[in-house]
Each structure stands twice: as structure tokens, then as C-alpha cells.
Amino acid sequence: MIHFDESMKILEAQKIGAYKTRRLPLMEARGFVLAEEIVAEENSPEAPTSGMDGYAVRHEDLALGRLKIAGINPAGSRSVETLKPGEAIKTFTGSLMPEGSDTLIPIENVTVEGDEIRIDEPVPRGFSVRPVGENYAKGERLMAEGTRLEFPQIGVLAGLNRSHVTVYSRPRVAILATGSELLELGEPEGHAGQIRSSNSYTIEAIVRRYGGEAIQLGCVGDDRDSIAAAVDNALAQADIIVSTGGVSVGDFDFVKDVVGALEGAELLFKGVRIKPGQHIMVARRRDQFIVALPGFAYSSTVTALLYLLPLMAKLQKTQTPLRTVRATLREPFVKRARKAEFTACNLRLEGGRYFVDFEGKKSGTSAILTNMLGPVGLLYTSEEEGNKDAGEEVEVIAFD
């Protein structure tokens, strides 16, 4: 088995031969990843613009105390008036500043007396005037390729008059659960040795949450031929194939053998010194990836987060969405093995600091998916680390 860090380096080193892209209408592109660089083609604004309602003036004229109202300058007006000394032009938010003006004095700072304004509270030169290029300048790179499009990006693109945008196609992830003991949702239980297939639904939820398209292929029994047919079916329609179960060392664990026999497949690694999920296997066939996860629910969930998400991100030329934070232990942590461990914990933000405890988290096998309930994070300790005392800082994978 290899070190966890080595397995991550292997994933990072993978190069994609041909990325899949799509051209989408702007509002359909939310949640997708940009496949182009967005560069401003003009200044925004193109000319000095009012930042609020008030009066456009020459700053030096404020010392006069009173100014004549020479006109009104509504937003959207095509023509721009010229301001003369000793005058003020009523100007609204978003209006172009009149020629000769350099300052906008808010309506709250003046008193209107007939056809004049009295200056009650002066403002600094340039007050509330948006300069050319304040928002962005012509030629400025606004969004890099690989940026995920959410509401700020959508708004900026709309301001750029981009009705369509080129994005990376969402990776199609085929999900396959292996095991003769598995029951589909709604299928009646025949005996106590059967269990409900939950892994495939957990993984589908992960895929959907992090911007992929899930293809559910159901349950397959522990039969080499059935598994081989299911994997072939998955390869015909998906970018990534995720299986659960069948990768350990048991007599009926056939997934590793099926993948090993695939024509053109390259085994990236089989076995990583991590807890849970040490029997994780990742293989590649051209630009397709096969991620074979263990069968226990907590184990398959953790390894899906660690190994599936980076591959989904790679197919979209972006970074894994998982983030880590530093947190303080409220209680001691006992390291269970000389492996990289990912331990479910409660992660709470209090007074600007993260804290970790294990209240309600059960000790046992890697089948306990209920440990992922609540304000959960994954406490990460490398295989070189040992026990931790209360008050120590630790690294935690956080879920927004």
C-alpha cells in the first residue's frame, strides 16, 4: 500500500487528453465551470459617472456657498450638459457626469432655495464620482478558465453582455454497487443477511452536490461476469465509473480482477495507507477513470470525497471543492492506526475560531455512516502523527 500523499500526487499528475465543453445560455451555465478566460472588452464605466443622487459641481465652487441650478441630468440621457462656473446640475445615480464637473454633492448635503442650492456640508473633491474603469478596465482579466459560475460571475457576465458562455461539460459519473447481499430501495428483505444499498445514493448525492451528472446502474451480485458486463456498460456512457464493494481480498471480491482485465486500462494504485478505505483502487482508460471504493458505508463515503471529487474537478480543469481549516480540539484524540486517518468530528465556528469535539460520534467499524450527521467535518491526521491533546490545533476537512 502506498502513502496517502503519494496517492494524491498520482491524481494531481493525471493529464486529460481532450476536455468536453459546451456552449450554454448564461442562466443555464450557473454551477458549471468556465472553459474560457473572460477579459473585459471595454471600460466600465466608459465615462465618469454619478455614484448617487445629488448635484454635479466643480469642487472649487463649493466655497461660494450657493450655486445656481442650471439643469437636470437624468440617468440614461444621451447628451451630457456642460457645467459652467458657479452652477450645479442635478444628477442622478448612474448618470454621466456633466462636462466640467468633478464632484457630486449629495442631495442630503444641500438645501434648495428657489433656483439655487445652499451648500450645507461640503464634500471632498471627486466625491461619489465613479472614474473610468472603476468596475473593470479594457483588457483586464476578470475570470480565469476553471472558475465555477455562481451569482457574482453571472452578474458580471451579464454586465459584459455575454448571453452565452463556454463551459466544461459536467462529468458523467456511473455508480455501481456490488454485493449479493444488497437490496434496492423498496425491495423486500428475504433474510437477516441482506442489507439496504445506501452507498450508491450517498455517492449520487455527492456527485450532484459537487457539479456532476450521476448515472445509477443499480446493484450487481458477486459474480465476475455480471460485474464485467456492468463495468462495460458504465464505460460506454460515463467519464468516471464508481463502484462500491469487491475491492478487498475476499473470495468474492471481483472488481479488482475485472478492472485489471480491461483492455487499455492502467492501474494508478491499489491500496493506500488510510483509515477508512485502505483497499481503494483507482484506474484509468484513456480519459476515463474507474474508482473502486470499499463497501462499508462510512468508508465508501470518505474515499469518494477524497478520490472522486479531485477527478471530477480535473475533468473540468478546476480545483477540488474540499477545503481544510485549522481547528482546536476540545477533547483528546486517540490515533487508532499508523495510517492517514479521516475521523468524523463535530466542527463548530465560535467567535471566529473553529473547534472540534466528538460528542455523539460512535466508535466501531467503518460502516457507521450516522457519524456523518450533524455539524460534521473530517479530522485529518497523517500516518506520521500520533495522539492529540485537548487544546491542540488539528487539520479538518470542512463541508460548507
Image (cartoon, helix red, strand yellow):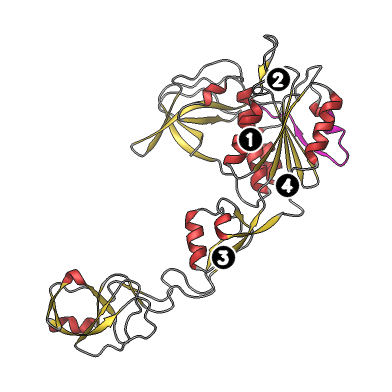
Precedes in sequence: disc 3 or disc 1: 3
The answer to whether the residue labelled 2 contacts the one labelled 4, judged by CB atoms less than 8 Å apart, is no
Q: Which residue is mark 1?
A: 204
Cα separation, mark 2 vs mark 4, equals 34 Å
As drawn, 230 above or below 98 = above
Q: Which residue is mark 4?
A: 14
Q: Quadrant of residue 38?
A: bottom right
Q: Position of residue 183 (x, y in %)?
A: 69, 20
Q: Which residue is mark 3?
A: 163
Q: Which mark is residue 148?
A: none
Tell me the crowding category of disc 1: few under 14, some 14 to 19, or many 20 or more residues within 10 angstroms, Cα based: many
Q: For residue 168: magenta?
A: no
Q: Is residue 184 visible?
A: yes
Q: Amino acid at mark 2?
A: Leu
Cα separation, mark 3 vs mark 1, equals 31 Å
The answer to whether the residue labelled 3 contacts the one labelled 1, judged by CB atoms less than 8 Å apart, is no
Question: Dot 3 lies on which element?
Answer: loop
Question: Dot 2 lies on which element?
Answer: strand
Q: Amino acid at mark 4?
A: Gln
Precedes in sequence: disc 1 or disc 2: 2
Cα separation, mark 2 vs mark 3, equals 47 Å
Q: Start and end of the magenta stretch?
A: 258-276
Q: Position of residue 339 (x, y in %)?
A: 63, 26
Q: Which residue is mark 2?
A: 182
As drawn, 91 above or below 28 = below
Closer to us: 103 or 24: 24
